[in-house]
């Protein structure tokens, strides 16, 4: 093997120059310099940074500073394509090899590699582990391996993939080549396992903050979730977003209803043909589709920085998945929304799925992780504190940017309300679900109630002054506090527990939370911190889209929203001023500068 750490080109730039001249940024984010220095000195490393926290630069900068080739192991074709397109737009020689290419295209890339014309090569774990591919690597000056989405290595990770588990073969085959493992989501057990499974040698471990302060976390109790979703989306006009659901059927149903309501939306799940999934993902990346309704199949390949909201229509199975999926919003650092609709009755339903896991240890881990997710959903304290504490980043202060902080839960003396609800369940014979009990409480004139003679009950219509949603929240709280048992094996019928007796007798004063029947979503200008010219920004966005379409790349490959907003704030009119805009390097100045500067000058002249 060639020792590439001593063979960098004589005219090679240092890390700071690369950051400035290639990527167009003035300074590294916290932790990036430390990780890059470790790579340049030939050390292994494990890098934990949140989605949008700058993980890619941690290996891209040393890849350009070192001699030789950096091989990046990436799990999805779409992710590789996005990364390579962005690097090529910056003037960086990067390529990928995957099944989307013809044999001739792959042979051309192999020839470029042997001619030292490529600095970064992206491959899937399935490809890099083949005998032929490893043989090819032995004949190339490999500078570094970067393992992206490294949590897939670990059995304890939330997205374990068997081929990732075998990547330790790289360390055995190339013992002198440094390896950098990168992930956004790994608890302590997963971190230890990544180091062990990849056989990292005395690695530098950098754990950045998991906090994404630009994301507002909001949880709404499910009442009429489709109506709640529509109401939220009306406040997100012309914004890009993802809506996650747990089943394909629900994905298709919601996407169809959104399209019928006039939203630019599409569905995405594993049941669609590969060609259709690829089309939808590309259209979303190019801002041709604004909203994607998806299962978790719409996963790690999302490299789009201007996703402004992520909605979970159902509760995820663990906090790692929730964190990673919400982290697809606001990757550009601008404000974003993470909304979850939650029905407490979903908790026992989800837990039943774990019963099918044969490995007892694995089942216990999955159950424990879901319990943490359920505790997050049911909590009455700052959402961000709970998330950060889960990843061992303990915060003593509330964040001020989640639903709990912005609209704190209010307690009230709920004994009388509870007695009405409990009495109704009892007098109806303890064999009906929540919806029917609420109909009795509200005095609904239904055929079923009359057939059962329940309109003659003393509890009939005693709660008619409150809405259906109000009573639904109260009954859920009584289940949560152990006064009612909801039997999911018998049609979710309600039955009183022993704990209900003292409440019914008035021997115990019960505190309940005031039902929050409508979440307050504060609509705000996502780019407000720039104090920018909005008309100019619109013109720059239109120009960006035109240039991107001409090159057949997503608009963010040209410039992201934050860079455009800074242009609309700083109003550069010459090359020197344009280079001072964050995200503008020499390649993009030469490629796009004339177009954007002309648009700005014309705007200022009018």
Image (cartoon, rainbow, N blue to C red):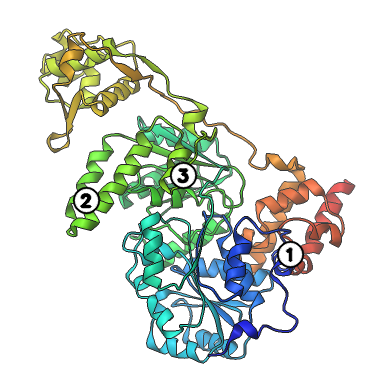
Residue at numbered disc 2: 354
> Could you tell me how many numbered marks the image carries?
3
Residue 131, quarter of the rendered image: bottom left
Percent from the top left, x then y, of residue 518? 44, 26
Residue 543, quarter of the rendered image: bottom right
Percent from the top left, x then y, of residue 166? 35, 75
Q: Are marks 2 and 1 in contact (CB under 8 Å)?
A: no
For discs 3 and 2, the disc positioned in front in the rendered view: 3
Residue at numbered disc 3: 388
Quadrant of the rendering where the C terminus is positioned: top right
Residue at numbered disc 1: 20
Percent from the top left, x then y, of residue 285? 55, 58
Q: Residues within 10 Å of mark 2 (few under 14, many from 20)?
A: some
Question: For the residues marked 2 and 1, what is the alpha-carbon distance in whole angstroms?
Answer: 49 Å
Q: Secondary structure at mark 1?
A: helix
Percent from the top left, x then y, of residue 161? 34, 67
Q: Residue at x 14, y 23 (%)?
A: 497
Q: Nearer the viewer, residue 353 or 267?
A: 353
Left or right of 396, for residue 221? left
């Amino acid at each position: 093997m060639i020792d590439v750490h001593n063979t960098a080109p004589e005219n090679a730039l240092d890390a700071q120059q690369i950051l400035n001249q290639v990527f167009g940024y003035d300074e590294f984010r916290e932790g990036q310099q430390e990780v890059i220095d470790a790579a340049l000195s030939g050390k292994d490393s494990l890098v934990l940074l949140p989605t949008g926290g700058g993980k890619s630069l941690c290996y891209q900068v040393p890849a350009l500073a070192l001699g030789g080739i950096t091989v990046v192991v990436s799990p999805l074709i779409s992710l590789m394509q996005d990364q390579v397109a962005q690097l090529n737009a910056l003037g960086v020689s990067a390529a990928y090899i995957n099944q989307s290419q013809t044999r001739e295209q792959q042979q051309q890339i192999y020839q470029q590699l042997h001619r030292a014309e490529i600095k970064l090569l992206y491959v899937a774990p399935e490809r890099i582990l083949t005998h032929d591919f490893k043989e090819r690597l032995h004949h190339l000056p490999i500078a570094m391996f970067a393992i992206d989405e490294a949590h897939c290595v670990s059995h304890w990770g939330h997205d374990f993939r068997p081929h990732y588990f075998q990547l330790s073969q790289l360390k055995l085959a190339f013992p002198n080549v440094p390896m950098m493992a990168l992930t956004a989501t790994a608890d302590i057990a997963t971190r230890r396992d990544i180091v062990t499974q990849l056989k990292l040698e005395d690695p530098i471990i950098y754990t950045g903050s998991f906090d994404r302060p630009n994301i507002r976390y909001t949880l709404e109790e499910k009442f009429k979730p489709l109506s709640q979703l529509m109401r939220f989306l009306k406040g997100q006009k012309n914004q890009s977003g993802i809506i996650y659901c747990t089943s394909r059927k629900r994905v298709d149903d919601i996407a169809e209803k959104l399209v019928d309501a006039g939203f630019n939306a599409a569905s995405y799940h594993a049941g669609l043909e590969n060609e259709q999934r690829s089309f939808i993902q590309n259209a979303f990346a190019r801002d041709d589709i604004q909203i994607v309704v998806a299962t978790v199949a719409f996963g790690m390949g999302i490299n789009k920085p201007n996703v402004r909201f992520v909605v979970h229509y159902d509760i995820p199975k663990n906090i790692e998945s929730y964190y990673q999926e919400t982290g697809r919003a606001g990757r550009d650092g601008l404000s974003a929304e993470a909304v979850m609709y939650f029905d407490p009755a979903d908790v026992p339903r989800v837990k039943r799925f774990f019963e099918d896991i044969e490995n007892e240890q694995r089942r216990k881990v999955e159950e424990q992780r879901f319990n943490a997710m359920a505790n997050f959903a049911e909590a009455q304290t700052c959402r961000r504190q709970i998330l950060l504490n889960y990843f061992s980043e303990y915060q003593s202060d509330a964040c001020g940017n989640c639903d709990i902080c912005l609209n704190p839960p209010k307690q009230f003396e709920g004994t009388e309300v509870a007695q009405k609800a409990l009495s109704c369940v009892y007098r109806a014979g303890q064999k009906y679900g929540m919806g029917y009990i609420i109909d009795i409480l509200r005095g609904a004139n239904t055929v079923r109630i009359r057939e059962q003679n329940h309109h003659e009950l003393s509890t009939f219509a005693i709660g008619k002054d409150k809405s259906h949603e109000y009573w639904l929240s109260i009954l859920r709280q009584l289940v949560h506090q152990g006064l009612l048992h909801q039997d999911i094996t018998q049609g979710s019928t309600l039955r009183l527990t022993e704990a209900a007796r003292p409440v019914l007798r008035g021997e115990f004063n019960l505190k309940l939370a005031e039902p929050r029947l409508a979440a307050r979503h504060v609509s705000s200008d996502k780019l407000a911190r720039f104090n920018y010219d909005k008309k100019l920004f619109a013109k720059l966005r239109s120009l960006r889209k035109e240039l991107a379409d001409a090159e057949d790349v997503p608009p963010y490959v040209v410039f992201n929203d934050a860079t455009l907003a800074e242009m609309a704030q700083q109003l550069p009119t010459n090359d020197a001023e344009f280079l001072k805009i964050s995200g503008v390097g020499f390649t993009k100045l030469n490629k796009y500068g004339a177009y954007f500067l002309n648009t700005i000058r014309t705007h200022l002249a009018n």
